Amino acid sequence: MCVALVFSKDRPLQLHTCLTTLCSSTTSTLQKVHVVYVASKPVFEQGMRKVQHLHPNVAFRKQTRLSTDLKEIVAQHQENLILFVVDDMVFFRDLELNKVEQLLEKDNTILCFQSRLSKNIKKSFTREESCVVPLLLPSSFPSIRTFFPFLGDSEWNYPFDLTGGLYRGADLIEILSLVEERFGLEMLDHPNLLELYGNKVLSEDIGFPNSESHLIACPSEPVCTVVTVNRVQEVFANKIYAHLDVDWLARRFLEEENNEDFAVDLEWYRNQDFDCVHTKTLKLLGIAPWES
């Protein structure tokens, strides 16, 4: 069975669209969806309460210390597959988690499944250049490909990924333990640092067995995108397309009584030729597109 762990900060509207599309994007049932969130202002806290009301089956947890929250949730689901999600993701095709689960159960050479990748991804938004795309190998399912990450770069050589990466719970416990042991507990206290040092563990051969020989699986066709229109963290100056003010978005979300206006235009996303993981457009059915 698969569970999802969603990281969110100060983006209640984007979290709502993320959860709505995530929960409708797979024919298999997610056993549980956890949200660990930060709300730095009262308007964001109010927005998060609205999200909780709209998603009563999701387990919300206000972040205390991320390392504690993360380790407790992962330990709770160490026998499951765990899908990491960030709140600016939009899912628009079936994740087919039942097939992913079968693949990871029978093939220990596959480290993880990275839902944000597909055969279309040829550009890196953050590096503003083309990616080296590794040879995509067939799997036992036509809708899933596999690849060796060391044969690619940027998006294709990023084995520990909180943006749609799916891992075995037991592997995550080992990865988190290695990060804490080698780099310190504080490296688990921020998602960006967690990614940075999780990738060091997997790429520098400092304890995780045979990490370079592992394959990674991904969808053949795009199933999700990352709507990169605002930044809510200060650790890294990550590139964004534009800045949609998070305060304005939260107020807009709170003021709107017709929640159907926030439904995502899934058909619009399905019709896009995403050659990059990131997009500049948040396309909703009841509201004009928000983009740079």
Image (cartoon, grey):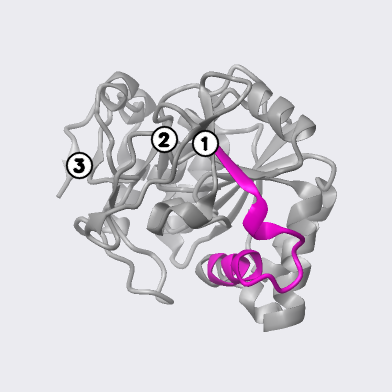
Q: Which residue type carries mark 2?
A: Ser
Residue 137 at x, y percent in the picture: 52, 33
**Precedes in sequence: disc 2 or disc 1:** 2
Q: How many marks?
A: 3
What label does residue 129 carry, if any?
none
Tell me if 155 is positioned left or right of 203 in this view.
left
In the picture, which quadrant includes the N terminus?
A: top right
Q: Which residue type carries mark 3?
A: Trp
Residue 163 at x, y percent in the picture: 49, 50
On the image, numbered disc 2 is attached to which residue?
A: 118
Tell me if 240 is positioned left or right of 31 in this view.
left
CA–CA distance in space, label 3 to label 2: 25 Å
In the figure, residue 257 lies in which quadrant? top left
- Secondary structure state at the residue bearing disc 2: loop
Dot 2, how many residues are within 10 Å of its Cα: few (below 14), some (14-19), or many (20+)?
A: many
In this view of the protein, which residue sits in the foreground, 51 or 106?
Answer: 106
Q: Which residue type carries mark 1?
A: Cys
Dot 3, how many residues are within 10 Å of its Cα: few (below 14), some (14-19), or many (20+)?
A: few
73 over 232 or under it: above or below: above
Are dots 2 and 1 in contact, CB under 8 Å? yes
In this view of the protein, which residue sits in the foreground, 98 or 22?
Answer: 98
In this view of the protein, which residue sits in the foreground, 148 or 235?
Answer: 148
163 drawn magenta: no
In magenta, the rendered stretch is 194-217
On the image, numbered disc 1 is attached to which residue?
A: 218
Are dots 3 and 2 in contact, CB under 8 Å? no
In the figure, residue 173 lies in which quadrant? bottom right
242 over 120 or under it: above or below: below
CA–CA distance in space, label 2 to label 1: 6 Å
CA–CA distance in space, label 3 to label 1: 28 Å
On the image, numbered disc 3 is attached to which residue?
A: 290
Residue 7 at x, y percent in the picture: 55, 54
